[in-house]
Image (cartoon, rainbow, N blue to C red):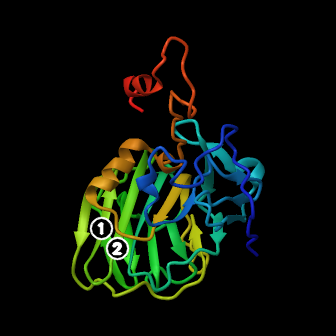
Amino acid sequence: MIEVIESIDPSLSNGYATGPGESAYPGLWDGLGVAWLPALGYQGGKLYDVSGFKKPGALTNMDAATDWTTDADGKIALDFDGSNDVVTSGYTLSGATEFSIEVWVTQAISGGSDDGGILTCNLSYDDAFFLGFGVNDITQFYVGTTVVRSPNDSFPRGVRHMLTATYKASDFMKIYINGVLSVTLSTSVPASVPSHTGVEIGNNLTIGLASAMSFSSCIVTERTLTDNEILERFTLGADAPFRLAEPSPFFVPAGFVFPGFKNTAIFKHMIGR
């Protein structure tokens, strides 16, 4: 059973942006649907949705004492053993006509299913949607029975990558690796995502496609990101939407006259206010 968290207890003591008005990059909030970032929102058996839309995940078949680890950047991550580890959620993409999925993951050197799921749902991988690994170090992205796959050796094990999948109804499905377009499919693209229940991270419990991986983040945007937006997100890093904006270095209260400046308007002009 998924518990809805009414308040988020961030794992970072200095907090993080909880909306575009607090963010150093407010444009990255446009269309934001869900954001699971272990480094920003975790506690025991729960993976918080730090977007503020309260779609947390629940660690299932996992041990919170050992599965919270660190990634290549030393930030908190989740370790999936490739057997039956999974994070379940109440978030769904049923009926969606466009979306983008951005994940930062490292596939383990060994272990897990050949077709291990990164973000999937509780149906057969070609019944709704599936984003995961494949044989020969590829990635694959399904919407319904339509699939697009990256080239062989494009997603080597043991190295952290940003993987992005975008979908636009009846138009295209794309895979990007580290901010760069890898492959596009523009034929037989479904008109919408088939109905399903909750999204699952790291495994497909219905058919047992488990991934052995270190999971750093997943952000789902309920629109199709552009090439430039995806490259920007790769350049800035996984937590960019949630970085707090720097406060203004100057604050001039109304009517305040700085010592030595009898004309406050002149001083405000000097500092750009």
How many discs appear?
2
172 displayed left or right of 160: left
Q: Whole-percent x and y of residue 127? A: 46, 86
Residue 91 appears left or right of 106: right
Picture residue at 55% right of the left edge, 13% below the top: 259
Q: Which residue sits at x=60%, y=77%?
A: 198
- Residue 84 visible within the image: no
What's the amino acid at mark 2? Tyr
**Residue 53 location, quadrant:** bottom right
Is 217 or 21 nearer to us in this picture?
21
* x and y percentages locating residue 77 in the rendered image: 60, 47
Q: What element carries label 1?
A: strand
Q: Which of 226 and 23 is in front in this view?
A: 23
* Secondary structure category for the residue under label 2: strand
Marks 2,1: beta carbons within 8 A: yes
Q: Where is residue 39 in the image (x, y as percent from the top left)?
A: 61, 46
Picture disc at residue 167: 2
